[in-house]
Amino acid sequence: MPQAVERADGGWAWVVLLATVVAQGLTLGFPVCVGIFFTDLQHEFQASNSETSWFPSILTAMLHAGGPLCSILVGRIGCRATVMLGGVLASLGMVAGSFCRTLSQLYIAAGFISGLGLCFSFQSTIIMLSFYFVRRRALANALASVGVSLGITLWPLLARYLLEHLGWRGTFFIFGGVFLHCCVCGAILRPVSTGAAAETRERPPPPSKTPRRSCLAAFGRALQRHLGFDILWHNAAYRVFTAGVVWMILGFPLPHVFLVPYAMRHGVDEHRAALLISIIGFSNIFLRPMTGLLAGRKDLAGHRMYLFSLAVLLNGLTNLVCAASADFRVLVGYCLVYSVSMSGIGALLFQVLMDVVSVDQFSRALGLCTILESISILISPPLAGLLLDITNNNFSYVFCMSSFFLISAGLFMGGSFYALQKKEKQGGQAEAEAATSEAAPEQALTAEGPGSEKRPCPEVMYVTSV
């Protein structure tokens, strides 16, 4: 029976948008609530802060590092099947995690397997959304980002309620059933007619007499196809962006993991501590779409990189306020200001990347950037946990550490982008002066008289990615 084919910008596109909102809430919103289980997991396994911190770091790292593998699966089996596979993996990982007896088993089950499944479901829905929306793509992406905010709002409340009644094992088991809803979201993603010719698959190369070299060459071609190492080598702006983001990520996820334990250690009630994460998510419901639409304006194209650097700088300065006081009212104000900077980072991150690389290079540039981000995400929470162990659970040092990475990353990117832009402007002026000086003798030769033969000037076409 042939599959139904939908058209882009049609009525079914809004159903796909709703499925994307739900999928983003289930996937990207979930890692934020893991900090609620931090104390219970630490007591259950009699582990240190550093050892317990490996669980959220592995989960979040796989959510980013699985991007290239997700792209390969989308090309092989399609977005619909990849989303449903991700839902099954995320569910199996959480159910298996509820039966784990050691932290290493939890790392593999609820960390590695669930994180990879969340990555498949999240990225595949975003890819399909770009096929369904062409004319209203900026609006669709802004509305889809509401799902992340809804997830950040609802996951902590659900986790806190289930933790009180079922414990962390029962909560993980229920979460396994919740992640099966990603399969429902995937079933909604009908194939879409893009109006372009379908991509033809390359024929397999003939068998080589040296299979080892053939495998290495195929692996090298796959890396080159999905990861933009050549872009990193030739594009200075992309190097600045990648280095700044990787350095920023060393401090950015720490408040999500340690805010709830920090508040509880200073006498804040468990319910109110979990409410802090929900305040961040609820604020982002309104802030993230607004900043997404604002970031998509063409008149801000030349200033987006500076706005992104400013958002990173503001995020780091905000964490210093949180480190100074653990009063609940101060923490609520911190969450509100933190939401503004967080929404700015989330809305501008991909926009700035689109500005520094061309359209045909974006996929490979994003793949390499997410791989490098995952390394920072993997080591950041355990590094902060080690700092807690050394300082006898003084959480203020963790927020100061987060501020250091964010503030230095914001200053580095802002200053480097300004230097590159100034250098590019000076180079453009030098080229214009050289072109003017070269054109002067040619004009003198063409003005010799009617007897002189004029040669037509070749037409030059500039291809730009706007």
Image (cartoon, rainbow, N blue to C red):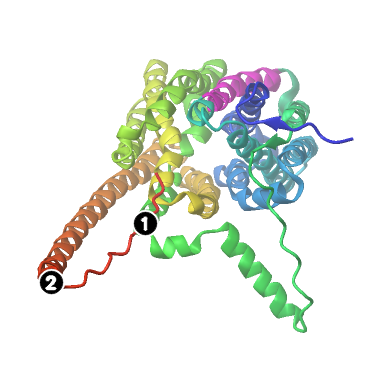
Q: Main secondary structure of the magenta part?
A: helix
- Please name whichever residue, 33 or 199, is drawn nearer the observer in this view of the structure: 199
Q: Residue at x 57, y 43 (%)?
A: 53
Query: Which label was assigned to residue 461?
Result: 1
Residue 356 visible in image: yes
Image coordinates for residue 441, horizontal then vertical, percent: 11, 70
Secondary structure beneath dot 1 equals loop
Q: Amino acid at mark 1?
A: Met
198 versus 122 height, above or below: below
Residue 341 visible in image: no
Q: CA distance from mark 2 to mark 1?
A: 25 Å
Q: Quadrant of the C terminus?
A: top left
Range drawn in magenta: 143-164
- Please name whichever residue, 140 or 280, is drawn nearer the observer in this view of the structure: 140
Residue 116 position by quadrant: top right
| Magenta segment includes 166 | no
Q: Residues within 10 Å of mark 1 (few under 14, many from 20)?
A: few
Residue under pointer 2: 445
Q: Are marks 2 and 1 in contact (CB under 8 Å)?
A: no
379 versus 458 height, above or below: above
Secondary structure beneath dot 2 equals helix
Image coordinates for residue 400, horizontal then vertical, percent: 36, 39
- Please name whichever residue, 233 or 318, is drawn nearer the observer in this view of the structure: 233
Name the N-terminal-most of marks 2 and 1.
2
Q: Residue at x 29, y 41 (%)?
A: 302
